[in-house]
Amino acid sequence: MTCVLPLVDCHCHLADARLANERISIVKDCATHQVQRILINGTCPQDWQTSIDLARQFDFDASVGLHPFMAEMWNDIVERKLCDCISSNKVRAIGEIGLDAPTGGQSDELLRNVFLRQLDIAMEARLPVALHIRVPWNEFFDLLSQKGITCIAGYCHNFTGSWEIARRLLDLGLCLSFNTSILRGKRVLKAVENVPLDCILTETDTPDMPFNDEAKRPWHVRTVLEKLAEIRHCSIVDLSNAVLSNYNRIFKTT
Ligand SMILES: [Zn+2]
């Protein structure tokens, strides 16, 4: 018999245009699968309001931010809209924001500026961040030290790095969010084993990162929990309860 576990997906994109026809049925199915908390991450001004509306309608939470892939959209109007959105009591974080390799008309400088500006807005608003970091880790840590940033509230999404990197992120005050990539990853195993229980979150990045050729859905965090429990030799029930209480603490949802 499979036991009932409270499930938490702290990083998914249910407002993504690709899910326009199915998002309501997906959110409804989340209840059947015991998904208790979802942070719906908006990635651009076009999906921020949908993220907030979905969160309000189904009693989940929203996060708004400009994804690094869309950094060239940043301007004063977008900044104002972001600041308007975070006044909603359903917005619990800023994200998905971060650093990635430049594409198209982007430059490293643009990516860094857009990321730092949103980090500033999050700090001023005392909101945690949902971080996407796909540059060499040293570039990320060097940027923070150049700017004198020593503490960040929030989580690093889809963490797949080494324990040495994990420790540096934990020292900054960040939590680590694990996805189904830990099923294949070798380098990440030591971080999974050693990260303190109160710094672990789970996510799916729905609709990205398909899972065994199946469309990714928030309840697939159960597979992530099973793998985490196996690697850490701990009870899956204790782990899922810890992830739920971590989520509530980080996003101040209780
Ligand atoms: Zn994402």
Image (cartoon, helix red, strand yellow):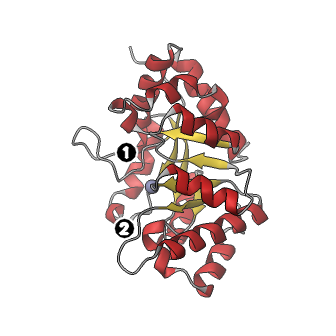
The x and y percentages for residue 198 are 66, 30
How far separated are the C-alphas under marks 1 and 2? Answer: 15 Å
178 sits to left or right of 83: left
Quarter occupied by residue 183:
top left
Label 2 Cα neighbours within 10 Å, binned few <14 / some 14-19 / many ≥20: few
- How many numbered marks are there? 2
Q: Which of these two is toward me, 235 or 56?
A: 235
Q: Which mark is residue 191?
A: none
At x 47% / y 79%, what residue is drawn? 72
Quadrant containing the C terminus is top right
Split into quadrants, the picture shows ligand 1 in the one at bottom left
At numbered mark 2, what does the secondary structure look like: helix, strand or loop? Answer: helix
The x and y percentages for residue 242 are 63, 27
Relative height, residue 15 to residue 171 (above, below): below
For marks 1 and 2, the one nearer the N-term is: 2
At x 62% / y 35%, what residue is drawn? 167
At x 52% / y 29%, what residue is drawn? 191
Relative height, residue 65 to residue 156 (above, below): below
Q: CB of residue at label 2: within 8 Å of ligand 1?
A: no
At x 59% / y 28%, what residue is drawn? 195
39 sits to left or right of 160: right
Residue 56 shows in the view: no
Residue 129 shows in the view: yes
Quadrant containing the N terminus is top left
* Residue indicated by mark 2: 17
Q: Which of these two is toward me, 129 or 254?
A: 129
Label 1 Cα neighbours within 10 Å, binned few <14 / some 14-19 / many ≥20: many
* Residue indicated by mark 1: 217
The x and y percentages for residue 152 are 70, 51
